[in-house]
Amino acid sequence: AEREQRQLAETLREVGATLVSTLDANTVLDRILEQVSRVVPNDAADILLIEGDRAHFAGWRGYERFGVVDLTSVTFLVAGTRNLQQMIETGKPVVIPDVHADLDWLHVPGTEQLRSYAGVPIRVRGETTGVLAVYSVTPGHFEWLDAERLRAFADQAAIALENARLYQAEREQRELAETMHEISAALASTLDMNTVLDRLLANINRVVPNEAADIMLVEGDRAHFVRWCGYERFGIRDLAHVAFPIADRPHLQQMVKTRGPVFVSDTHTDPNWSHFPSMGWLRSYACAPICVRGEAIGFLDVVSTQPGVLGQLHAERLRAFADQAAIALQNARLFEQVRDTADRLQALSHRLVETQETERRNIARELHDEIGQIVTGLKLRLEMSS
């Protein structure tokens, strides 16, 4: 037992050094799945990461032999998965000798041959951010000793994942700042409203990746679509005639009131979501208000067909983009107002000139007629006196 403990400690030291030798998140995930079998032999392994109320597969290994190639689109509601809830609440491992005998087990199609399970929470600063799990085709394969080994490995994995996350977050912030600077310059280079709207829509995907996006502007108590893209692939080609009463849309109301962004992880489970027959494909949503002097003048929307894809981070990014949009749109509106005022003044000036010219012509005509009459009268008098 002592020798096994020394071997485990040495293995964990080597594994830890391997994991922290890179700051690339994908590489870290791959190395975790490569190295976990050194600590706990298994037939398959995966890593679930938790975002909001859902968990999604961030990496997997060994599933190929069972015909499962891609788990990217598979997500779970944490509230509907007892094992996840248990690990989140207790911070302790879960061992299931035979998942076929577990009534609460959530089966992933194609993994029916996997029978034994051991999972441990990946915890950062006392918070469960994910789950590392191993599987065996043999019922009863994993014991609590395996779970304890796995937990020690998960502690190493948590450090590596957090370092990678922090590095990625810093890099993304730097890239976002550069992107926002470029977008700001592009928007500031024009004062034409239509061009501003086109450029906003063209650049929104650089800030928040999405499958469809749109811009709505507020007129009175309604929000109407002025630009959109991506909806064509879902059979929606024209949204120009679509307008929403803000009072009927809880999320729009919330943004008008708080001037902050919102996101919906899954529209099918959100009680405030307004469903439309032609948009049942829309599952994830993020929106930010375009505010000028504390008033929402419009909204920027992005959507996805996959639940859990859009979250708080995307909503915050969208808010930063909306702040740039607000400046550009307000400048374009002010320019339009100045241009309209100038056009009206020019038209008024033209009318004044025309009025003056007409008056001059009238006066000239009257003078001509009066002088003609005087001359005629004088001529007659001269003729009579002679």
Image (cartoon, rainbow, N blue to C red):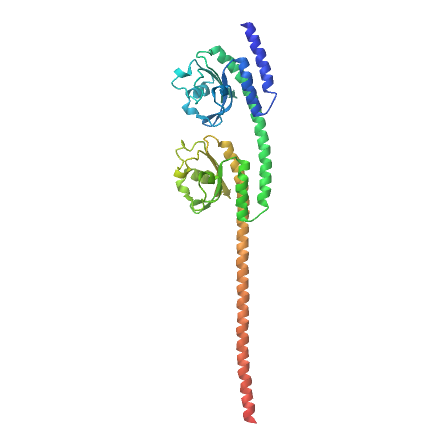
Q: Position of residue 273 (x, y in %)?
A: 40, 35
**On the rendered structure, is 335 left or right of 251?**
right
Residue drawn at 54 percent across, 68 percent down: 356
Q: Position of residue 330 (x, y in %)?
A: 53, 46
Q: Position of residue 303 (x, y in %)?
A: 47, 36
Residue drawn at 53 percent across, 76 percent down: 365
Instruction: Determine the image quadrant of residue 39.
Output: top right
Residue drawn at 55 percent across, 49 percent down: 192
Q: Looking at the picture, does residue 187 appear above or below residue 81? A: below
Furthest residue toward bottom: 386
Residue drawn at 53 percent across, 79 percent down: 369
Q: Is residue 132 visible?
A: no
Instruction: Determine the image quadrant of residue 180.
Output: top right
Q: Nearer the viewer, residue 275 or 165?
A: 275
Q: Position of residue 264 (x, y in %)?
A: 45, 33
Q: Looking at the picture, does residue 92 appear above or below residue 207? A: above
Q: Quadrant of the C terminus?
A: bottom right
Q: Nearer the viewer, residue 334 or 213?
A: 213
